[in-house]
């Protein structure tokens, strides 16, 4: 992979590794965005308004996660690839089912996506630290903290169900 010119002094080998890790965070984050919006659009039944607003909150947070990944990897000389075709090919998340009867079914599906993205992000924290890119590792730590917070909020609706 050839990087674009930058005055960033991080070793090129480290930058290439970080760009690859950040693109992985980007692709999976975009999938979380789309799953959250799918849930937001299609939720109905008891608890509609709370879930509708919560799913939109997750969507908005996922936009921030993906922007962090994309902007960091471009700053390192990479090219962000958030195209639908790329996300479809490279996502590690399970496809979102769209035939749910209850709002809590959407919450459970989104919780699964958030948990999977959280696990991926923890791996990205470790991999970027191992690659000796503390800044990228810190970025993934920031994302992971937010993913865990949003998973907690979604799961709160599933307690006792």
Image (tube, grey):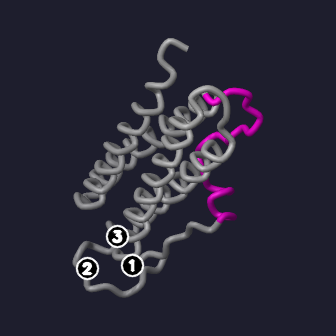
Residue 3 sits in quarter:
bottom left
Percent across and percent down for residue 145 are: 31, 43
Task: Give the CA distance from mark 2 to mark 1.
Answer: 8 Å
Residue 17 appears in the picture as rendered:
no
Q: Which mark is residue 15?
A: 3
Q: Residue at x 52, y 33 (%)?
A: 111
Mark 1 neighbour density, 10 Å: few (under 14) some (14–19) many (20 or more): some
**Residue pointed to by mark 2:** 8
Residue 160 left/right relative to 98 = left
Residue 125 left/right relative to 58 = left
Where disc 1 sits, the SS reads: loop
- Which badge, 2 or 3, is on the more N-terminal residue? 2
Above or below, comparing residue 38 to residue 27 in the picture: above
Percent across and percent down for residue 6 are: 32, 85
Return the residue nearer the eye: 126 or 117.
117
Determine whether label 2 and label 1 are within 8 Å by CB. Answer: yes
Determine whether label 2 and label 3 are within 8 Å by CB. Answer: yes
Determine whether label 1 and label 3 are within 8 Å by CB. Answer: yes
């Amino acid at each position: 992979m050839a990087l674009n010119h930058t005055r960033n002094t991080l070793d090129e080998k480290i930058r290439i590794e970080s760009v690859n890790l950040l693109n992985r965070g980007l692709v999976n984050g975009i999938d979380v965005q789309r799953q959250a919006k799918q849930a937001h659009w299609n939720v109905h039944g008891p608890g509609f308004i709370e879930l509708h607003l919560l799913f939109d909150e997750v969507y908005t947070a996922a936009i921030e996660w993906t922007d962090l990944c994309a902007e960091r990897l471009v700053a390192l000389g990479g090219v962000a690839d958030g195209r639908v075709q790329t996300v479809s090919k490279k996502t590690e998340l399970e496809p979102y089912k769209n035939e749910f009867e209850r709002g809590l079914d959407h919450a459970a599906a989104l919780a699964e996506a958030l948990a999977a993205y959280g696990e991926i992000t923890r791996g990205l924290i470790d991999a970027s630290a191992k690659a000796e890119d503390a800044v990228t590792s810190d970025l993934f730590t920031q994302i992971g903290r937010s993913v865990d917070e949003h998973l907690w909020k979604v799961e709160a609706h599933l307690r006792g169900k």
